[in-house]
Image (cartoon, rainbow, N blue to C red):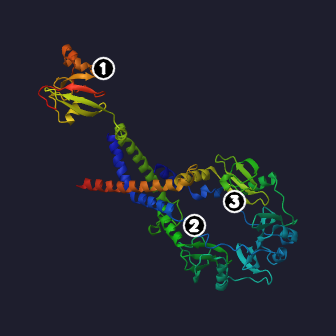
Amino acid sequence: MSFINSFKRLHKWLALLVGIQLILWIVSGIVFSFINHDSVDGGFIYKKNKTNQIIQAENFAKLLKNYPTATELSQITLLGKSVFKLVVENKTLLLDTQTRESIVIDEDLIKQISQENYRGGGELQQVNLINESSDENRGFSLPSWQLVYDDEFDSHLYFSAKTGEYQGIRTSSWRTFDFFMMLHFMDYEFLGIGQRGDFNHALIIIAAIILLLFSMSGMLLIYSSFSRKDFINIINRFVQHKKFTVTLIDKNNAKKNLKVDKDKRLMDALSEQNIELDSVCGGGGICGGCRIKLVNADESVQLAHLVEHDTLDDDELKQGYRLACQLSVDANMSIELPDNIEP
Amino acid sequence: MLIWSISGLYMTAVDLDIIHGDHLVKELKPNIIESDKISPISEQIIEQLAPIQSIKLKVYFEQSVYEIRSAKQLTIVDAITGEIKADLAAKVIEQQANEIYAGEASIASVERLPAYPGEVGGRKQPVWQVQYDDGLRSTLYFHVQSGRLISKRTDLWRAFDFLWLLHIMEYQGVGGMTGIIFRVFSITSMLMALFGSWLLFYRLKGEHQ
């Protein structure tokens, strides 16, 4: 038992260490399962217009003569026009295919690009050039254009200010999701721990180890706190018990019927009816105080126990005397109570 | 709760970069395009693949190719000959794999699969699969025509994916009920946690009295 107690003590201290975080894990888990993942993703709000297409391939080789260190050259469409996208020494350039001049992604241009593909049903409110990384635009290359719409999703669209490329969308659902993600990943930046989106830092690993110990000690305690009796009690509650009739006959030959659960001790069944037999030994089968007389019963009930052979003599047994403390009710029966007892 | 904590511990304790096998491949410097060898794309190919969304010229392992993306597919055109590129041979893939692989182990098998296996998305397109004999069944996947490295997998990643499914209780064969199973379990454990904190509070308070 002291073994169990030490586990209880361990479990208690582990709960104190990891309890609040555990609740945060569970709450955020519930949020993740209920939140609308389409609104978090926002993919339906900004969809590339697929009607733009390349009809004629430009002369790649000719352009490359001017950029001998280029590593990648693409022909894409921008607002219905063909444009070259060139990667030179890890820098990306956009060039007009006709004039070969570089295209600057200014506020006007980014508005047009966004309006062409935006399907959120709101009005454009603000256009901001973002130069600093934040929780919302982390992972996007900077500088970045932020376009704020007043739709029901509170959409912020992000575009690379260098190439005009769509970087992603942040909706109010995303912000909620991300907040709970921060709690789930324990990215508590105000404590100087973790970075947003990082789940490999020391704090969460330690917390996970404590949680594992906590779950294991909890499992052990659950196992030890249940006994077989608990399950039998539950089963008994649901399974209808078979009942038998015990007919009580007193000295005046008056009769009274009792319904008794199968297998109940006769003495207990009588006691529940406030019929207390003169037992001194408390049901041990030694004092003989609880003797009753079987008048009518199945053979199975008539068979006497060993202790009854000790306590009652052969004559008494033959007459049908039995000890109520040894008799279990597993058939209908009629019994005579001692003279001093009234049913 | 035990499953959540075991899977959670694994996912946090093993660094995500190691899961992703970033240490398995070298970062190669992008190759410079040699413009004097490049031939233009014929109008015939453009017509054949229309409507086209983008054309990219790039060098993979000294092979200059046009990647032509249309609504339906990605087509690789040899930028030197100007013709649609034939599938690369096993030998070439093996050579490329060795060039990019940063580990110590040797190649166990090079196989051309008719479709992407489930672990890399199951697309119905052929792919070259190169497996290494490193105890973790490290695997590199290459595009059949361009030889571009598509993806990599190790047993660490496969275990991560498996534990992730356990973590979000995405049990297969239960169909559309999976989300509900998760909700039932998570709400039940919430109740457990609340009762638990109540018990803890009274226990700590009781001991001071």
Q: Residues within 10 Å of mark 3 (few under 14, many from 20)?
A: few
Report helix, strand or loop for mark 3: loop
Give residue B16's quadrant in the image: bottom right
Q: Crowding at label 2, few (<14), some or many (≥20) Cα neighbours within 10 Å?
A: few
Q: Position of residue B114 (x, y in %)?
A: 76, 52
Amino acid under disc 2: Asp
Residue A4 lies, with reference to residue A178, above or below; the image says above
The answer to whether one can see residue A71 in this image is: no
The chain that hosts pointer 1 is: A
Residue A43 % position (x, y): 61, 69
Q: Nearer the viewer, mark 3 or mark 1?
A: 1
Residue placed at 77% from the left, 56% from the top?
B96
Say whether disc 1 or disc 2 marks the residue closer to the N-terminus: 2
Residue B26 is marked as 3
Q: Secondary structure at mark 2?
A: helix
Q: Chain of mark 3?
A: B
Please tell me how crowded label 1 is: few (under 14), some (14-19), or many (20+) other residues with Cα within 10 Å. few
> Disc 2: which chain?
A
Residue at which label 2 appears: A38
Give the CA separation, mark 3 to mark 2.
36 Å
Residue closer to the observer: B198 or A195: B198
Work out how far the residue at label 1 is from the one at label 2, CA to CA, in angstroms. Answer: 74 Å
Mark 1 lies on residue: A299
Q: Residue at x 78, y 67 (%)?
A: B68
Marks 3,1: beta carbons within 8 A: no
